[in-house]
Amino acid sequence: MGSLHCLILVVLPLLYIVAAAATCSNGTCKLLDECSSDEDCGAGLYCFSCSPEFSGSKCVRSSFTNQFKLINNSLPFNKYGFLTTHNSYSIEGVPSYTGVPRITFINQADNVTQQLNNGVRALMLDTYDFNGDVWLCHSFGGECHDFTAFGPAIDTLKEIETFLLANPSEIVTIILEDYVHVPNGLTKVFTDAGLKKYWFPLSRMPKNGEDWPLVSDMVAKNQRLVVFTSIKSKEESEGIAYQWKYMVENQYGDGGMKSGSCPNRGESPPLNDTSKSLVLVNYFRTVPLNLLSCEDNSENLINMLQTCYGASGNRWANFVAVDYYKKSKGTGSFGAVDTINGKLLCGCDDVHACVPGSTSQACSKR
Ligand SMILES: *[C@@H]1O[C@H](CO)[C@@H](O)[C@H](O)[C@H]1NC(C)=O
Ligand SMILES: *[C@@H]1O[C@H](CO)[C@@H](O)[C@H](O)[C@H]1NC(C)=O
Ligand SMILES: *[C@@H]1O[C@H](CO)[C@@H](O)[C@H](O)[C@H]1NC(C)=O
Ligand SMILES: *[C@@H]1O[C@H](CO)[C@@H](O)[C@H](O)[C@H]1NC(C)=O
């Protein structure tokens, strides 16, 4: 073969690839357009490769729709859905604080500040007594070890304080898997982090299935931090709400990922117990698998939310808890929460369809 001919054979396909990749760039790429860097994608999107689902990288969603700004915040707290990260503190690449290499599972890729900035509004944290303090730890047997520890809880709580200070209309919920037994250990760390001033008081939590206070009222009173613990006695001893007195929850881990079934978590009342006003749906694997999370956070998540809606006595989830919240084939966990908010706020399949005058196709009622 002549060398010119050979050159053409090599160069032409290259030109084609360059041309194809350049159909959009520098912020002009839309959802599911091919991209080569985050900068190519428009606002609220990033460049992600959900292999093996699609080859190459595409722009997928990286942030939420603020339902309070898009619609309003004048409804009760339990009439909204919130994106929730499971083990929010178990973040890849975080250096070891103890000096001992960490041997445990990782559930998220972004730090808590990034999670909050991208629209995560509920954080699941595991708290332990460790090194004379309260630590976040991904452990077993109720004890934290050097090799399962992430860091002192105060660091993460201070990130939350910074966010609440900078975002005076936002509400953050913390759901603790709590192994702290030191008396007032949690009270001390929340106080030290400067979070007590945002505390939503136990006395205002509905105890018999009533609606929660209005979000606008929680904001006006600056009661913008809602905290739940898994230790019942802390209601009495520290005024921290016992989660399952106010919330029902499906099974977490693999047991909560079986298509078509939505059993309750052992500690939770049955999902259809409507004397609890809040509903939490977990959708993540027992062993987090980074590669599979993009598949998990897509259609399968929406299907499970629908299944759990039925199991909860026709109630949509308020909290949608996932691993690797930003990984998806397109709209992912953000789209799932848009669906929930659409259903909750106006009975449509997407919160964008609730906007007066919307021409969205996502509403069967129009
Ligand atoms: C990319 O977009 C920004 C803002 O739209 C613009 O200022 C900049 O010049 C663009 N860069 C290139 C290489 O086109
Ligand atoms: C979170 O991550 C961002 C981006 O990498 C970084 O700029 C920021 O300092 C991090 N914040 C904390 C508290 O680790
Ligand atoms: C709640 O669900 C259980 C099955 O989990 C069922 O036996 C019970 O009848 C349901 N209760 C109501 C009030 O629907
Ligand atoms: C807030 O939005 C909801 C849902 O669309 C609507 O029913 C309600 O009337 C709105 N409230 C105000 C004060 O606009």
Image (cartoon, helix red, strand yellow):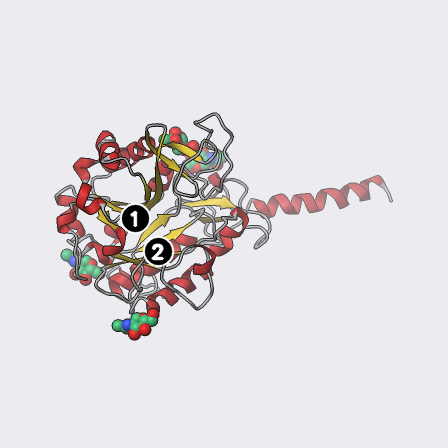
Image quadrant occupied by the N terminus = top right
- Cβ(mark 2) to ligand 4 < 8 Å? no
Q: Nearer the viewer, residue 278 or 342?
A: 278
* Number of marks in picture: 2
**Position of residue 298 measured from the top left corner of the image (x, y, whole percent):** 46, 57
Of the pair 208 and 350, the residue shown nearer to us: 208
The C terminus - image quarter: bottom left
Q: Identify the image quadrant of residue 154.
A: top left
Quadrant in which ligand 4 is drawn: bottom left
| Residue type marked 1 | Ser
Disc number for residue 306: none
Check disc 1 and report the residue beneath it: 230
Q: Is residue 73 left or right of residue 333?
A: left
Q: Say if 227 sits above or below 81 in the image.
A: above
What residue type is disc 2 on? Val
Give the residue drawn at x 49%, y 42%.
Answer: 105
Dividing the picture into quadrants, the one containing residue 116 is top left
Q: Nearer the viewer, residue 117 or 22?
A: 117
Residue found 81% across the figure and 40% down from its top: 4
